[in-house]
Image (spheres, rainbow, N blue to C red):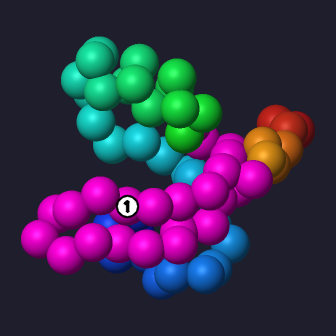
Amino acid sequence: MALAEAPTSTNLVITRVTTREADRLHYLHALGLIPGVELVVHHVAPFNGPIQLQAARRVPHHRPQPR
């Protein structure tokens, strides 16, 4: 689900970032918006407006170990 489509007041975890643009990736990283971060969307403005959110903490990502 895209962040702009997320319901407000719900805890979410960023699972992936779909852009490959280096400038955007650096910007998101500087804001702490990287996979594994838990956040809450407070408000999504209409017409591709800004999204107000609060990043909470990094959630450990567990990958299954190969056998």
Residue 31: percent from the left, percent from the top? 53, 32
In the displayed structure, does residue 35 sit left or right of residue 1?
A: right
Neighbours of disc 1 within 10 Å: few (<14), some (14-19), many (20+): some
- Is 52 above or below relative to 7? above
Where disc 1 sits, the SS reads strand
- For the point 28% across and 18% down, the residue is 23
> Can the viewer see residue 4 in this picture?
yes
Residue 54: percent from the left, percent from the top? 62, 56
Q: Give the range drawn in magenta.
A: 34-56
Q: Name the image quarter holding residue 11.
A: bottom right
- Is 25 above or below relative to 40? above
In the displayed structure, does residue 49 sit left or right of residue 57?
A: left
Is residue 43 part of the magenta span, yes or no?
yes
In the foreground, 53 or 24: 53
- For the point 60% across and 33% down, the residue is 32
Q: Is the magenta stretch mostly helix, strand or loop?
A: strand
Q: List the residue tagged with mark 1.
A: 51
In the foreground, 14 or 64: 14
- For the point 28% across and 36% down, the residue is 19
Residue 5: percent from the left, percent from the top? 34, 75
- For the point 33% across and 42% down, the residue is 18
